[in-house]
Image (cartoon, helix red, strand yellow):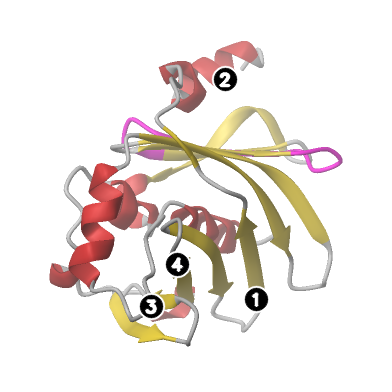
Amino acid sequence: MDRRTFIAAAAASLAATPALADKLSLNAISNYLNGIQTATTEFTQVNDDGSLSTGTLYIKRPGRMRFEYNPPEELLVMAGAGQVGIFDGKSNVQKAERYPLSRTPLNLILERNVNLAQRDMVVGHDFDGTATVVTAQDPRNPEYGTIQLKFTADPIELRQWVIRDGQGATTTVILGQLALGRDLPSTLFNISYEEGQRGG
């Protein structure tokens, strides 16, 4: 999977938000995000070639997340201390490939005070009859593609996101029910600690 696509997908995963019988406002979505301290859920990812991947997502706001992929995938993605780290068992097992969090869509969702209504990355805000759909794109780097987030109600939750990269490839991530408020150790989001555990 293309790393840019993954980072965008990871970003979308964090946009857990509500959807009522009508379209939710961006302020309502922002308030929901700001109310999340920790969240855990299982996910299923549908790749562009139709293959499936599964795993567990951990969120600890602000600024931290972790995607653990189940075997046979050898992939782990973490965000913490202002960076995104990618461990790929096929190329970099011990040392993470790092990106500044501020240069990824993750930053939009993980920042301490989310205010989507005042951010220029939101390019679509719709209601499809069952879910509120928010589409985001980096205005300075439109070639990275788009993130489309879908939120339902009863309970209010993010249900899925769809990533379309600059080449038109699509990645869909479907989330299970979010478990909120669990105690998550900070080491889950510490890239340097993970490298140490791996002997890096």
> How far apart are the two marked residues, 4 and 1, measured between alpha carbons?
19 Å
Q: Residue at x 77, y 38 (%)?
A: 70
Taking the image as drawn, is residue 116 in sight?
Answer: no
Give the mark, 2 or 4, whose residue is nearer the N terminus.
Answer: 4
Placement of the N terminus among the 4 image quadrants: bottom right
Q: Residue at x 31, y 83 (%)?
A: 123
Give the mark, 1 or 3, whose residue is nearer the N terminus.
Answer: 3
Q: Which residue is mark 3?
A: 21
Disc 4 on helix, strand or loop? strand
For residue 35, what is the image quadrant?
top left
Specify the label residue 151 is tagged with: 4
Amino acid type shown at disc 3:
Ala
Q: Is residue 196 above or below residue 136?
A: above
Disc 2 on helix, strand or loop? helix
Say whether residue 143 is magenta. no
Q: Which residue is mark 2?
A: 195
Query: Within 10 angstroms of label 2, few (less than 14), some, or many (20 or more) residues?
Result: some
Disc 1 on helix, strand or loop? strand
Task: Point out the frontmost of discs 2 and 1.
Answer: 1
Q: Which residue is mark 1?
A: 170
Magenta stretch bounds: 70-83
Give the mark, 2 or 1, whose residue is nearer the N terminus.
Answer: 1
Give the mark, 3 or 2, whose residue is nearer the N terminus.
Answer: 3
Say whether residue 80 is magenta. yes
